Image: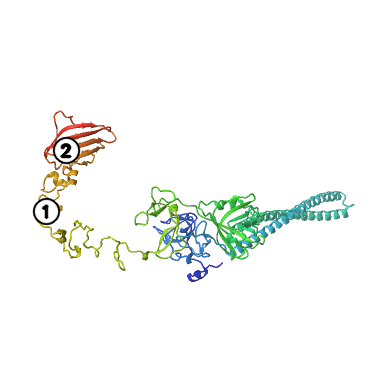
Amino acid sequence: MARPVTAAVRLLTGEREPVRLATTANITLYRLQTIDGVLTEVGDRVLVKDQADPTQNGIYTASEGQWFRAADARTARAMQKGTTVHVQQGTVSADRVYAFETLDPVIGADPIVLTFYLSQNTLGDAVNAANAAAASAAAALSSKNAAATSATSAAGSATAASGSASAASTSATNAATSAANAGNSATAASGSASAAAGSATSAGTSATAAAGSASAASGSATVASGSATNAATSATNAAASAVAAANAVAALGYTFSISTADADPGNGTLRLNNASAASATAAYVDNLDSSGATVSGVLDTFDDSTNTIKGQLTLRSKASAAIAYVYNVTGSVVDGTGYRKLTLAYVSGAGTLPTAADGIWLIFARTGDKGADGTGVGDFTGPASSVTDNIVTFAGTTGKAGKDSGVAVGSLITGPASAATDNIATFNGTTGKLVKDSGVAVGSLAPKANASFTGTFSPPTNAIALNTLADSAAVSVLGRSANSGGARADIAAGSDDTLLRRVSSALGFGQLTAGMVPAGLVTYAMLASQAIASNSEFQLGTASKLLTAAALKSTVAYQALTSGATVSWDMSLGNNASLALSTSATLNNPTNANPLFGFVVKVTAVTSARTLSLGANFVVAAGVESFPITIQTTETVYLTGFVDTTSRLVITGVVRT
């Protein structure tokens, strides 16, 4: 078939620009490399068709770095089903044409499958070549048989001629003897001698002729034998040519059966498991093709790929290329005894497969093996552990991390089939799992923080309100005596920074005068925050301020010290401390030590016995256990003492409990 030569013609006919090479296995799309026996060069167009990840298949431009898809093969339209590409070089694929088989592929997402392209003309030519080769073989065989018969006849003729030559030789000898005898009686037999001489001459000629005939017959036999040998060789070559022609078709001939039973479909027959070819999920293929050849070994290779999709199976009418169905082979080939079972996933197809004898082609294109698994992780990560059936919620705002919400799916409530917008939901029953539309709109409720009411407010009897607060013998207001007289105090009329007070048996607002504060009472100014001493100020005695109960309590509370090889202690935070030793340590010289204050240090040991040493500013009184001391995990040790100076602290006792 003549190939298009311009880009416009190729575009119209669904053909891409030719490629130099085509892959035969999975490759790394990087750097120059040897493909199909040929080293690639920068700028080479390469048909990549056997990737472990079939989404990578397509036409690429070779380079010394990363390979990219060719400019004319980057869209779904450029690699549409039926698009073909011609291969120029390569040990396997030189002069082959491949076809794209994926319908409307999404580049980079959908698997892209390519198969060896068999046009209707190609199939017809191959079949005709096979038939012609078979006819040639038959003719050569007939020629061989005829030549063998001719050789046999020629051999018989040679034998007869040889006998004739021998007889003629004997006759010549007898004639010579007769001539000699006649010579002895020349007178009596001169006529006989003359006749005998003629006879001898004739016999010699006959012998010569017989010898020539024998030689010619022998040559004929030799030629006939050579012809027979050549005819046999021609028959052998013709048979091989027929086999090669059949193999060149790259397809198996079969008769299609409309039966859907999982059983041996019969010699040279295949069937699907569904009357609708587009709904079929399995094929049952006889171990013999329509020519009677055993092809079970070929069928068994259909699951050799390590990919999930083993390859693509095409069932195509021999009479019309438009009638074809394509399937992915997705499982292992199963031996059904006399036939093979193939697991299929429908891809595309059109038309009705013919049921005529030897009416369809079975074509298979194997998928490349699965590549090595990557070591990457997903975009979304979950927690280290979770509770079964709990709902997953986002952890943070990245959208990449999830956590166990602590809410079980079974604890979710079920709402009604419908509800009014902005109505309040209430429980429906006592299960706590069903809700219903209460019929109450949110807008009908009084706002929680809004104290405005409509209409006239009427408080209950004996309730106190601004418009009913008046003198009453039975009402006591803010300390007013039950029977005092005078008008009610109008709070709204009071000035800022005034107090409600009783003056001359009447309530009113006014300033608190000095005469109203008994001697010795603490005024507000004295209780201001600036007049209250902090714990540090109390410990250090650095301010003339009041001492609160909280500050006093904190001065005697244990200050927790941090365990370590060296333990620090700031006495401005408290003169009593607790220390849980997780390792043997030295109690360092305290900072902010205030003379004349006593102190207590409560010490325990964690995990195992620990040793405690003292800083240089500590002095152990006479008679007190010497340091360093060891504290067991089963005891609590109290160090008691006082601060003599800021740099001298006296230990007066070590108490073990």
Q: Position of residue 435 (x, y in %)?
A: 44, 58
> Which residue is tagged 1?
517
The one of 623 and 355 positioned closer to us in this rendering: 623
Dot 1 crowding, Cα within 10 Å, few <14, some 14–19, many 20+: few
**SS state under label 1:** loop
On residue 599, which mark appears? 2
Residue drawn at x 15%, y 34% is: 651
* Image position of 592 (left or right of 282): left
Q: Amino acid at mark 1?
A: Val
Task: Say whether residue 211 is visible.
Answer: no
Quadrant (top left, top right, bottom left, bottom right) of the C terminus = top left
Q: Is residue 584 above or below residue 334?
A: above
Q: Is residue 599 above or below residue 175?
A: above
In primary-sequence order, the first of circles 2 and 1 is 1
Image depth: mark 2 or mark 1 in front: 1
Distance from disc 2 to disc 1, alpha carbons, whole Å, reads 41 Å
Q: Position of residue 96 (x, y in %)?
A: 53, 61
Task: Say whether residue 330 is visible.
Answer: yes
Residue drawn at x 50%, y 69% is: 10
Q: Point out the residue furthest to the top here.
A: 623
Quadrant (top left, top right, bottom left, bottom right) of the N terminus = bottom right
Q: Amino acid at mark 2?
A: Phe
